[in-house]
Amino acid sequence: MSIRQGSGSFRGSFLARAALAALLIAVAVTALSTPRSSAATGAVIYRVRIPIVTGPRRAPPPTTDQNIDAAVAAGNLTPETGLLYKVYSAFGDPRLPPQFRGDDSRVVDSHALERAQASWATLSAPTREALRPFLTPPIFAGSWYDLRYNTNSTTSAPPAADASAAAPYPNCSDVNRVEWASDVGRVAHVKIWWPRGKVDWADIARTLLGQMDSEIWPDLTALMGKPLEDGDSPCGGDDSRLDIYLAPIARSQEVSLSPPGCKKTPGYVVFNPTAPFDTLAHEFMHAIQDGYNTTAGCVYSADNAWLCEATAMWAQDYVYPSTNKDHYTAEWYLKDPSLKLSLKNDQHEYGAYVFPLFLARSGSPTVIRTIWDNLTKTNALPGIDQAVSGGLEKTWPRFVSYAWNRPPYDYFKQWDSLATPAAETTVEVNLAGAGLKEFDAGPTELPILSANYYHFKFTDTKVRSVAFYNGWSYKVVKRDAGHGMGTAYFADAATAEEKKGASVQAYIKINGTWRFENNWIDRGVVTYCLDKQDERIEELLVMYGNLAFTPDGYSVKPAGERPKLVASNMGCYKWTGNMVMEQQEGAASGRISTIWRLEVPDLVWEWIESGSNDGPAFGYTLKQGTLRWSIADGPCGCEGMTHGSGSVALVPIHGAATLVSGNFILSGGLYRRMSTSSADTSRISYTDCGEPRESPLPFNWGVITLTGPTLTAMVCSRALTTSAWTTHRCGPGT
């Protein structure tokens, strides 16, 4: 048999079997198709890739809070002192030791005071005394502003008894109207305060009031409802309006009023006058959030804190969709989507606004209100699951496919000009001269509500067949394929527990056109034959997710091997060729009585069920073939009394005619080989020693064996078969 693919061929003789269910048999495949020249110009086109060399991307410098956290983790600060230092940092307090100051240029806001309120009862008396001025709004005596900037202040430190857990909140006296001026909104139920000594801040205050009246208040209250009024709070200014204080604070922040506490409470905003309007929308959203009577102990609890920031960042986009000042935080989430959605690390939770952005833009903004309403009955993740259509089981995989955010699926860019893509693992599928190569094709673990992307680019034109083994929702194992074929990957069914939470989707680029396959969860193996035009894959993006949202520590892990991709240069679509065979009966004893000659000059084999193959080999069915046969006496025959000849159309098939190529066999008998055992049951008529006979051919017409490209041996004690095959891989199919 000779198999030619591109250039190179092998020939050999092979043993025939009489049984229809013969062993699989194979012949080695050599050099495969080479790049073709342009049909239009006759020119061979070479692509040259010139790498652009850049220096390593520098990690951003740590923020102040990160420096403090590192010191606490190292045991150089107590957690209580670390909390106090974070409050100092948020308010620009000079008592913060300089060695902890970091780069806070991209820090959005601070919630150190919420943490202080939540842990107040466990704090020491000196720490509570140090924190009390920061819990006092700036317009009152004894506030941090009064103590730092009012040179006429006669306020002294509170008595020790007031620093006890029984008196956890500041005592707010009369408003210092000598130092502070104010104005109120015409539409928005707010009052903005500014120090009288800051003359230019009056114009800033009125500009901000204009934004509250025209944009922020109407947009957010129509969707989310109004913040609670502060008329009953002793620290709520001089009326029931939401108070916004302009102050030289390091980071703008919203603070829940104390008392009543950290949920179902009014709040106030301390705002840096140099901050943009978007930041005011962000802090106003926090004021609305504080009014919710959440199931958790505090609105800003461990379970809900990430959602507070994600939806406040989203509020910036909702009110000011064209300023795009929220975009820089998207990278904090998209740079590592394999982290759980609910992670809070002072960056990730801000970037996670892309999830509510997805919910609002792909559906309706009202879902954000529904989520927050649900927090009065449950925590953030169950609240989201109950709010979104189909629950997180349907919504999370869809978000994963949107978050990739590259053309033509760059949904966030189309919606909001947000061009930041999700991080991916890019794999160039290049055989590097080998005949077969395997690649890791997926993650080893994903926590709840997370994602991972593997992007394969098929740059090697010698790749002709590809198999993806889904180790995410199946149990991928490497084992012996049996029948002497060798070792290969298999995708066995995983248990419900083993695949709980797993989602698998794909974007596929074929012939320049992308398509989306939104559910590979039930596909253990996906194969492509690049010889076939409509399967000529150029890029494959596999998107993995963990759609489970409980319990918090749950993660999806492969039940067996991690997902794999195997690429081979073996052809796969169609094979054409011819076969010549001679069988000599009685050759074993040296007395050849009968000689059979078979020839098939027009063989055509075609891949069976393109795209559905789930084994380590490709199967082909016979599409065309004419068998020419003859029988004659041998030297020890009946002296010319055995004779006959004729032809048989092999299609439609009478019997069996299947070819197999071991495209994805990793090692063993069928590694880079082909096999067949074909027989035709059509009846033929001939004369045997003068006696007329009618029967099927007494042996298989198509045989290629596992023992190698060349074989001469006995089938039984009375027959010797010699055959020659010539087979060619067809050009690319249609």
Image: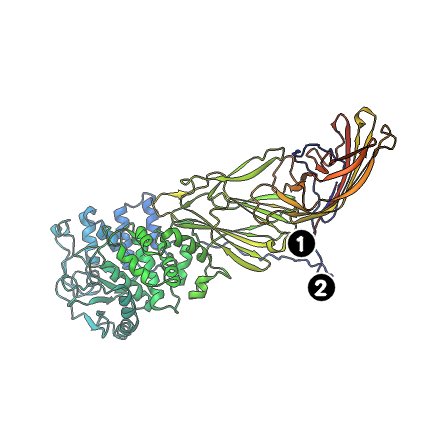
Count the labels in the image: 2
Mark number, residue 107: none
Q: CA distance from mark 1 to mark 2?
A: 17 Å
Residue at image mark 2 = 40
Residue at 11% x, 50% y is 161
Question: Does 106 sit left or right of 656 as displayed?
Answer: left
Q: Nearer the viewer, mark 1 or mark 2?
A: 1
Cβ atoms under marks 1 and 2 closer than 8 Å: no
Label 1 sits on a secondary structure element that is loop
Give the residue pinned by disc 1.
732
x, y (%) of residue 32?
Answer: 69, 47
Q: Is residue 79 left or right of residue 680?
A: left
> Which element carries disc 2, helix, strand or loop?
loop
**Which amino acid lies under the numbered mark 2 shown in the image of this protein?**
Ala
Vertical side of 626 occupied by 509: above or below: below
The image position of residue 624, as x and y in percent, is: 70, 48
User: Quadrant of the image for the C terminus?
Assistant: bottom right
Can residue 342 be seen here? The reply is yes
How many residues crowd around disc 1 within 10 Å: few (fewer than 14), some, or many (20 or more)? Answer: some
Q: Please name the amino acid that badge 1 sits on.
A: Pro
